[in-house]
Amino acid sequence: MAEAVRTAPVIREPAGRTRSSGAMVWALPPVALLTLFFLYPLALVVQQSFRPDGGGPSIQPYTEVFASQAFRQALWTTVWLALASTAGCLALGFLLALVIAFVPFPGAKAVARFVDVFLSFPSFLITLALLFVYGGVGMANGAWTGLTGAAQGPFQFLNTPWGVLLAEITYFTPFVMRPLLAAFSQLDTAQLEAAGSLGARAPRIVRTVILPEALPALAAGGSLVLVLCLNEFGIVLFTGAKGVTTLPMLVYGKAILESDYPGACVVAVVNVLISVGLYGLYRVVSRRAGA
């Protein structure tokens, strides 16, 4: 009997099942935290958007918001500002990255490093700096009034849509430059030398050699900037631009100023859906670009 017990086969769990159970145990804490701090609040926002004044489920908040002129105007302002800012960032970022990567000058490496540091700056800091320079009592207007004796300076655009556009292009251009500089660092300089030896001038080299290599990085950087501009709140708030109401500003106005929480949740849901769609586009472009 004892010998039979000693020789009985030992039943072991399959290795794959053990590893799978261990992975599930380790995955539970981050999933729980994600659910508690992100998915649950988001679900509450979606739920509130379908419950006007604490009543039963209804699509009334959506019909009211979609029918309002304020929402349509905010949506249009958000879209055109995001598209215009992205176009400006692509043009300026491509030009600056070209200069840093291919035009030798003292301090080029320091400037490239500063681009990385700039990415960590908060957006309101750039807006504040622009206010010091171009604000109603900023340096530029002060110099003008001091020289001409005029009552006010000519730079009165920061509290207009053009001021928001300038601030967004200034702040988000490095987000385009970073992937471009990485792409330019991988470019085979022999191609540039060969094109130059064949008599190609700089504009043609940029158009036929550099630009095709930079297109994936431009697409990835532009997609990211488009998502960020779509959700930008601090720049619009700090410029105090009159008549410039974006979707994030509309959420702020409905929730804080009007106490219209169902309406604010509807606008927030629309903003999230647009952002997630654009982020999906950014991920696809980045994957194809190898970013």
Image (cartoon, grey):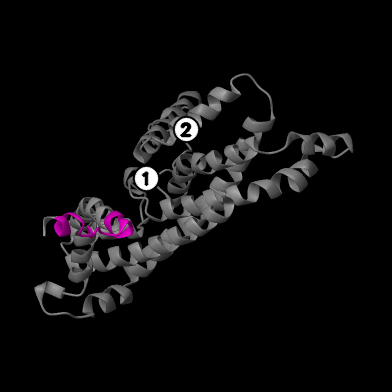
Q: Which quadrant would residue 49 be assigned to in this image? A: bottom left
Front one among 208 and 27: 27
The magenta stretch is 3-19
x and y percent of residue 226 in the render? 47, 54
Is 13 contained in the magenta span? yes
Please report the residue visible at 32 percent of the width from the left and 77 percent of the height from the top: 67
Q: Residue furthest right?
A: 198
- Residue 150: in sight, yes or no? no
The kind of residue tagged 2 is: Asp
Please report the residue visible at 48 percent of the width from the left and 40 percent of the height from the top: 170
Front one among 208 and 6: 6
Please report the residue visible at 23 percent of the width from the left and 75 percent of the height from the top: 61
Residue 291 against residue 274 in the figure, above or below: above
- Secondary element at tag 1: helix
* Mark 1 or mark 2: whose residue is earlier in sequence: 2
Q: Which quadrant would residue 248 be assigned to in this image? A: bottom left
What numbered label is drawn on residue 116?
Answer: 2
Residue 200 against residue 150 in the figure, above or below: below
- Residue 120: in sight, yes or no? yes
Q: Is residue 215 left or right of residue 196?
A: left
x and y percent of residue 204 in the render? 80, 44
**Structural distance between the alpha carbons of marks 1 and 2:** 20 Å
Q: Is residue 107 left or right of residue 197?
A: left
What residue is disc 1 on? 235
Front one among 286 and 61: 286
| Label 1: how many Cα within 10 Å (few below 14, some 14–19, many 20+) | many
x and y percent of residue 132 in the render? 39, 31
Is 40 contained in the magenta span? no
- Secondary element at tag 2: helix
- Quarter of the image that includes the N terminus: bottom left
x and y percent of residue 98 in the render? 65, 36
